[in-house]
Amino acid sequence: MLPQEIIATKRDGGVLERAAIEAFIQGALDGSFKDYQISALLMAIVLRGMSPEETVDLTRTMLNSGERIRFPEIERAKVDKHSTGGVGDKVSLILTPLAVACGLCVPMISGRGLGHTGGTLDKLEAIPGFRTDLTNSAYKEQVRNIHQAIVSQTDQMVPADRLLYALRDVTATVESIPLITASILSKKLAEGIDALVLDVKVGKGAFMQTLPQARELAHSLVSVCQLLGNPASALITRMDQPLGRCVGNAVEVAEAIACLRGQGPDDLMEVTFALGAEMLRLGGLVKSASEARKRLQAAIADGSAMTAMRSLIEAQAGNPEVLDAPEKLPQARFSRPIYPPKTAIGATIHRADADKIGQAARLLGAGRAFAGAELDLAAGITDLAKIGETLRENQPMGILHFNTESAGVEAAYSRLLAAYGWSTESVIRKPLVIERVDS
Ligand code: URA
């Protein structure tokens, strides 16, 4: 099958047969399809879309491009969670050990942050010594031993996605529901999971800015995952303001540890428990959301979630002392509180834009402007004020943490101030979980 025939079919709005999709992926991997041909087909897919059957075929073909891990010897249900990315989203750090403490196996393969959103791997690497680059065999052994891991994708897993994503990144072809679906699911299903819970974020700090877009992505992810034989559900969750009060790497690890100790901020725990309940339900451990919530709360109260976090850190060569002494995490040399202007004292916060706060953290060094850029793991923002709170004198709206006094700090200061809006009118807090999608 000639590449130009496959491209022309999609260009003209036709449906690609499974054989054409397989030829495309095979050709991309063995070099017989050139980058310009792959890019042309990707753009045709962006413009013409794909049917659910085509998306299933693309996902399956990408999944089969590398090693698909399986854990038949592990009796526990293997359930993972994926978030489409947000600001202050440290849920995976809390939920992985928490779900394991409740009886699941969570063999998580995760990613790095780019732009104003953070990445789970970057955050974990703020723990001194913590390794995320395990070999396939070390990853499998760890999952067999302690029923959990949070690692980066290995070279053997889903090479088709690595190749396609690199081209999509530089050809403006990331924004396509079928391509995003195939990319996310091929990587998650390569972990050998039994079920998947998706957190599709919507709002100013998210990839999907509107509810219809988020719904379309959630339905696509859930239905394709189910058609490939894996139970799945998605929660569409609000990402207008950051989750929790900390944005950065070390500062988010410290906040996640506080959550495991039962001292987490309400919004972060609300999303963690909602996703955790979905995981326990899909894993067959509970019958109802209320039973799940009790179980999750008990695992925090009795310390078993913290114990599971300790084994995760130890298994991946991190220093577990950070759990009792968060000051052993990287600390920034300088900090600077940001106070509300005098005219705002007594007003209620009605806006705390996640995108701007994420950009402020990036300007301090906590995030990447381009793929591969180095991070300052100690940099970030803590003590963020939340929507619905009243601004008070001497109470910061956030504290910037940074290692070098630079123009970036001034820019971060202005960006954080610009993120906030207030008024004298009261603000009704909207629930974070907007809806659940299960087909
Ligand atoms: N995340 C992914 O892994 N793939 C995409 O295509 C978009 C976001």
Image (tube, rainbow, N blue to C red):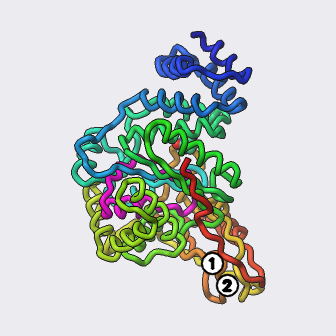
Residue 11 location, quadrant: top right
Q: Residue at x 72, y 68 (%)?
A: 418
Residue carrying label 2: 391
Kindly tell me whether residue 408 is visible in this rendering. no
Whether residue 429 sits left or right of residue 96 in the image: it is: right
Ligand 1 quarter of the rendering = top right
Disc 2 secondary structure class: loop
The spot of residue 170 in percent (x, y) is 63, 34
* Residue range (magenta): 82-110
Secondary structure, mark 1, is loop
Q: For mark 1, does the 10 Å Cα neighbourhood hold few (<14), some (14 to 19), or many (20 or more) residues? A: many
359 lies above or below 192:
below
* Callout count: 2
Q: Position of residue 63 (x, y in %)?
A: 44, 32
Find disc 1 in the rendering and name its residue: 397
User: Amino acid type of disc 2?
Assistant: Leu
